[in-house]
Image (tube, rainbow, N blue to C red):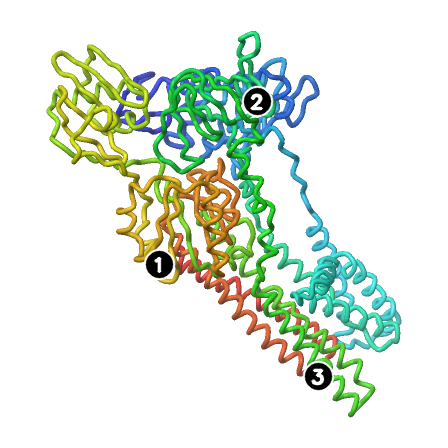
Amino acid sequence: MTHCYHCGDSCERQELHYDDKSFCCQGCITVYDILDKNNLNYYYELEKNPGISPVEIAGKYDFLDNNSIIGKLLEFDDGRTQIISFLIPSIHCSSCIWVLENLQKLNKGIRTSQVDFPKKTVRITFVSGEITLKDLVILLAKLGYEPYISMENMDKKKPRINRTLIYQLGIAGFAFGNVMFLSFPEYFQVQEFWLDRFSPLFRWLMFAFSVPVVFYSAKDYFISAFKGLRSHILNIDVPIALGISVLFVRSTLDIIMNWGTGFFDSLTGLVFFLLVGKYFQQKTYAYLSFERDYKSYFPIAITRISKDQKEEQVPVYEIEQGDRLIIRNKELLPVDAILLKGNALIDYSFVTGEAVPVYKFSGDKLFAGGRQTGGIIEVEVIKKVEQSYLTQLWSNEVFSTNKQHLFQSLTNKISKYFTVTILSIALLSGLFWMIFDLSKVFQVLTAVLIVACPCAIALAAPFTLGNLLRSFGKHKFYLKESYIIEQMAQIDIVVFDKTGTLTTHENTSISYEGIPLSQEELILLTSSLRASNHPLSRALYDILDKNNIATLDSFEELAGEGIVARHKAQSIKIGSSAFVSPPLSAKESNRTSVYVSSNDGYRGRFVFQNKYRDGIVDVFQQLGKDKELIILSGDNDSEREKLELVLPKDSQLLFNQKPNDKLEFIKQLQSGGKKVMMIGDGLNDAGALAQSDMGVSISENVNVFSPACDGILDASRFYQLADFFKLSKQGTKIIKWSFILSFFYNVIGLGFAVSGYLSPVVAAILMPLSSISVVLFTTITTRYYENRILEK
C-alpha cells in the first residue's frame, strides 16, 4: 500500500503524484510545494513522513479581522511588532520543531518563532504591517499546524510564578553549608589559639545564619502548625515547628550562657532537608491544564447577522438574546438557540455522551455544546453564553471545593500519635531527672524534642509520592498533585463513562446482518454513500470496496431519514428503519443501524458497534478483584449486553444519564462512605469528575481539551489502569516502611537524649543520616516497583 510522502497516511482513497512522489491529498502537495520552494526540504530528512495533512480553513478565521479579538490574543503590541503564543496540538517530532522555528523563511514579516515542545506551543514575533495575525494563522494551518484557539484564550491571565520556595530553599542551603563549616572545630575539639579566641564570633555567626532560616525559610511550618492547632488538629507540622523552635531557643541560650556551640548545624540542616522534600514533591505538569471548563471548548468568535443583513464576526461574549447566528459545518454552537433555517445534524457526544448525531429541523431547540456536522444553518439565540444549559453546570458548588482539604494523608494520621508520644516521653524524662539531677532537666527536655523532630517522617511521603508522580507521568498518567496517589490507593468504586472513555473515537466496528448483497447492489451502495456527508454514511463508505464507482442517474438525501438513489434499472434505499421499512423481526431500536433495501425489497442492515479500547477485558478483571465497577453513560443502552459479558458480575450499568444525574449519583455513592474514582472524557462528565474523590480524564490528545480533573490519562495507556492502582498501593506501603526506618533512628536518638548524653556531634550525625537514608530508601524502592509493575 502506498503512503503519502508528506504525512504518511494511506493513499487508499486517492493517490496523487507530484515531483515523482505520492501524496494522499492536494493539501499535502501544497505544503510540500511551499517547503520545497523555500528550500526547507530538510524537514523530510529529520523524520520520515513528519507532516500533518492540512484541513479546510476557508472562512474559518475571519474573526481575526476583529481588532478587539486580536487585542485580547496578543501578548505584546507596540503598533508595529506583535507577539503571540499558539497551542499547536499537532507538534510531535523534531521536524515539526524545525519547520516552526524557520517560519521567517516562509514570510519575511515573521521575525522569530520559538517552540516549547512539552507544552506544544510556539511563540511568534511578527511585524503587523507585513503579515496580519489572520494571515499568520492561515499560513500555520496550510502547513498542517493549525492553532487551537478557543474562548479560553480571550480571558487568559498571565500565570503568577511563585518562587518563594526556591528562595527559602536557597537561603536554608546557604546557611546550612556555612554553619557546618563554622562547626567543624567544635566537632573535633581542636585546641588552637586563634580558634579558641574567635570561637564566640563563630558561634554568633552561626546564630546570624540561622535567624533567616527560622523566620523566613521555616515560616510555612509555623503557619501550618498554628492553623492546625486552631482547628484542633495535630498535623505533621506541629512537631516540626516545635522541634525547630526548641533547637533555636536551646542553641541561642547555649551561646548566650556560654554552655556550648548549640545545635545550629542540626537546625539549618533540618529545615534544608524538609524544604528539599517539599520542592521535590512539587513536581507539576505545567503544560497540562487540570482546571479546564467550557471556555476551553467554545469558539472565540461567531458569525452574526447584523440588522442590515450583513455577516460579521463577533466575540462570543458579545452575543445577546435575539441575535441571529450562522453556524457552518464542524462549528460548535456556543449558546442555546432555536433553529431557523437549514437542516441541522448535531453531534452532542462531548456534552451528553450520545454517540450518534441527531437531526433537528426548523423550530427545534438546540443546546450549547453541540457541533453541526451538516451544511450551513441559521439560528436565533435564546440564552447568552453564561446562561446556557451547558454553562449552568459550572455554577454547581462542587467546582469550587478544594478536595485536598477533605483528605487526611497518612503522614498527618500518624503525626498526631507521634506528637503526643514525644511530648509524653519529654515530660516523663523531665520528671525523672527532676528527682535524680535537677541540673539536667532543661537539657534532657530540650534534647528529647530536638532529636525526635520528625524530619525523616516528614520526608517519607514527599519523596515517595514525588518519585511515583514522575513514574506515572513517564507512562502518560499525569496527576495534578502528589497527594492524589494516596487518594487513589483508597478507592473502593471505579465509575466509567462509556462513549470516548471505554470506546475509542478512532474506529467503529461495522457488521452486516441480512441477505448478501449482489455485486451490482454493492456498487450502487458504495456510489450512493460516497455522495453523502452523514457521519454514518462516511464510516460505512470507508470500509467498502471503492474500485467500482458508478455515476448515479438520480440521488436524493432526505434529512433525518436516508438516501434514495438509482443507477440504470437498479434502485436503492439506505437509512433508518422507518425510512426503509424492514420486517418487524429486523427492527431493533437499541443498536445503531443503517438499513438497506434494493428495488423496494429489504436486503439487510449494517450494525454499528463501538470499538472498545485495547486491554479493556483485562482492566475490568484486574480492577474487579477488589473494587466495584459501574458504567455511567449518557448514551443509550445498545451495548449493555456486550458490556455485561466483560464486566464482573453484579456491576451496575446506567444509561441515558444527564450531566447532573452523574454528579448526583457520585454524591449518593459517597454518602454511603465509599471512595469513588470517576473516569470520563467529556463536558458531560465534568460535574461527576469534580465531585468524585478522584476524577480522571481520558484523552486522545492531552494537550487539547479535557474537562476539569485530578488526573489526565493518555488513552494509549488505558490498558495500564490496574497497574497504576497497584503502584499507588505500593507507594503507601513504602511510606509506612519509611516510618518504621525513621522510628528506628528516633529510638537511638531518644536513648542519647533521655540519658542526658546528646551532644551536638551526635545530633549532627543522627539527624542528617536519618533523612538521607529515608530519601535513598524511598528512591530505590519506588524505582524497583516502577520497573516491576509498569515496565513488566
Residue 373 position by quadrant? top left
Disc 3 marks a residue whose amino acid type is Val
Q: What element carries label 2?
A: loop
* Residue position for label 1: 624
| C-alpha gap between disc 1 and disc 2 | 50 Å
Decide which of tag 3 and tag 2 comes sooner along the chain: 2
Tell whether 371 sits left or right of 641: right
Residue depth check, mark 1 versus mark 3: number of the one nearer the observer = 1
Badge 1: how crowded within 10 Å, few (<14), some, or many (20+)? some
Binning the other alpha carbons within 10 Å of mark 3 as few (below 14), some (14 to 19) or many (20 upward) gives many
Element at label 1? loop
Q: In this view, does 365 lie to the left or right of 773?
A: left
The residue lying furthest to the bottom in this view is: 436
The numbered disc on residue 754 is: 3
- The residues bearing labels 3 and 2 have C-alpha atoms spaced at a distance of 77 Å
Q: Position of residue 657 (x, y in %)?
A: 41, 42
Is 32 or 372 nearer to us in this picture? 372
Q: In the picture shown, does residue 708 fall above or below 465?
A: above
Residue, x 29% and y 43% (percent of image)? 639
Q: Which callout, 1 or 2, points to the residue nearer the camera?
A: 2
Gap in Å between the C-alphas at discs 1 and 3? 51 Å
129 relative position to 206: left or right: left
Judge whether residue 177 can be spotted in this image.
no
> Mark 2 highlights which residue?
321
Q: Is residue 548 left or right of residue 647?
A: left
